[in-house]
Structures are given as C-alpha cells and as structure tokens.
Amino acid sequence: MFMGPKTSAAVATILWGFTYVVSTTLLPHNPLLVAAVRALGGAFALLLFARHLPPPGWWNKLIVLGTLNAGLFFALLFISAMRLPGGVAAIFQALGPLFAILLGWAILKMKPSLLKIASVLIGVVGVALVVLKGNAGLDAIGIAAALGGTLSLALGGVLMNKWGKPPISMLAFTGWQLLVAGIELLLVALLAGDLPTVITVTHIAGFVILAVLLTAVPFVLWFGAIARAGMVVVAPFFLLVPITAFVLDALIKGFVPTGLQIVGAVIVVAGLLLSQWTPKARRKHSRKVPQVPHAKHS
C-alpha cells in the first residue's frame, strides 16, 4: 500500500471522526437503518472492484468478524451518536486502546509494556477531562452503546490478528465483512420498524458520504494497518476519533469547549504520541512488526 500502517490507521480514524457530524446533520434519526445502509453501501462499493469469494472454511469467521467490526459496532455507534453530543459520544472511543491491549493480552498473549499502559491511562485521563462538562447531557444508554461499540471493534481487530486473513484482496476481505454486517443490520432494522417516514435529497447525500468516504475507505485502511502492524500497535489511533469529532463540534455545530476540555484534548494527543514512542534499547527488537498471516485454505 502507498501508506505505512500507522499513517493508514491515522487517516482511517480521522475519517471516522466525521461520522458523528454526518449522522446528526445529514441523516434521518433511524440508527439501525442508517447503520444497515452504511454497511451495505460500503460493501457494494468495495465488492464492485474486488469480486473474490472467500474460501468455504472462512464463512464462519467472516460472520464473526463482520458482526464485531461492523454489525454490532455500527448499531451501537449510531445509537450513541443519536443520544449523546458528537464530541462526547466519540470521546469514548479513546478507550479503544485499553480494550485492545487487554484483549491482546488475554487472546494473543501479548503482555503490554508499562509504557503502553501508561500512555493509555494518560489518554483515559484526557477522556475524563473532555467529558467533564456541566451541560453535556450525558445519557446512560448512549454511554453504554459507545463503550460497547468500542469494545466490539477492538475484539474484532484482535481476532483478525489471531485468525489471519483469507487469500483474497483486502478490498474483498473488507467488503464481505461489511456485507455480513449490512444484512444483519437490515434485518434488525426491519424487525424493529426503524424506518424513516421520508427520505430527502440531503439524506441520500449523507448516505453516499457515509458509505463510501466514511466506511469503505477507512475500513480498508484500518484493516490493512492491523494486517501489517497488529491491532495492539494501531489501536492507540482510536484517540484521533474523539479529537476529530471534538474539533468538528466546535467548528461546525457551534460547540464551545471549556478550558478544561481543551487541556483534556491535549492530554489525549500526548497519550497517542507516547504510545508510539519506542525506547532506544527496544528499537532494535521491534523492527519487524507482527503481521496478520494469510490463512490457508480449509
């Protein structure tokens, strides 16, 4: 790919940070339907260019990965976005690195360094400072949904490292996961009756932006970064999601941050930078990054 794994992860998470503004300004307030259209639209955009079927033995894993990385993640993401202010909803994604590190330790047996743990804790402190706003309108269901979506995406990334990638292109691998998620979400949306009474031109434009620019593109970049560097390495870039949403809230929606929130945002960025720093004594041992292997045909 033309970008390194860390750059790919950074671009992907910055694009995800735009999701909150788009979902609350351009889309109908039907989170399950929006999530379904997002996944299906992204899947069709990718599979149009990468028409590769995964090996038969990979379908069960694709269902699990599609559900965690997109199906459950999208549903919870949009529920949180509709119930919380954009910046507040997105800031909970900063806890993603903590979830990824703990899951990587439990599933991949990758014991985190003290530096990695410290950087994550610094990021969590920044999260707390940004969220501490008297009139933020925090909602328990919205917070639970935001945390659940972050946990789902972290687990999906760790399982990608554990299982590897089928012998198909990254475009196809991403597209099939999104298709699985889209079918799941569409069924749930229909059963729940989460359908808008009218679809406007603004809604259609929002759906296109969401499906292509904020789903298909960033997920290919994100999965590629995981494949080349490992979930635990790229997970700290989750921190860029809330920072992006935080800035967009201020620029587009007229949200005025407090001084404490600005300090919190700076601390979040500091945590990200610290997470990417490697002491000189360890650099010679970390030149080879853990890559997701191609799984053999079953």
Image (cartoon, helix red, strand yellow):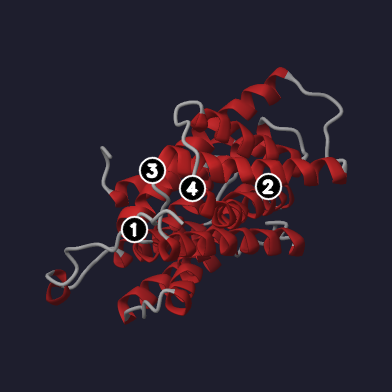
Image location (x, y in percent) of residue 85 = 66, 50
Type of residue at label 2?
Phe
If you read the primary sequence from the N terminus, does the residue marked by circle 2 or circle 1 appear first? 2
Q: Is residue 40 above or below residue 116?
A: above
Residue for point 43% across, 42% down = 220
Residue that mark 2 sits on: 78
Which marked residue is nearer to the observer: mark 4 or mark 3?
4
Q: Is residue 248 visible?
A: no
If you read the primary sequence from the N terminus, does the residue marked by circle 4 or circle 3 appear first? 3
**Residue closest to the eye, 119 or 169:** 169
Image location (x, y in percent) of residue 11 = 38, 43
Q: Residue 11 — which label?
A: 3
What element does badge 2 sit on? helix
Type of residue at label 3?
Val
How far apart marks 3 and 2 lie (CA) works out to: 21 Å
Type of residue at label 4?
Pro
Which marked residue is nearer to the observer: mark 1 or mark 3?
1
User: Could you classify mark 3 by the number of other residues whose Cα lies within 10 Å: few (under 14), some (14-19), or many (20 or more)?
Assistant: many
How far apart marks 4 and 2 lie (CA) works out to: 32 Å
Residue that mark 4 sits on: 55
If you read the primary sequence from the N terminus, does the residue marked by circle 1 or circle 4 appear first? 4
What element does badge 1 sit on? loop
What element does badge 3 sit on? helix
Which marked residue is nearer to the observer: mark 1 or mark 4?
4
Type of residue at label 1?
Pro
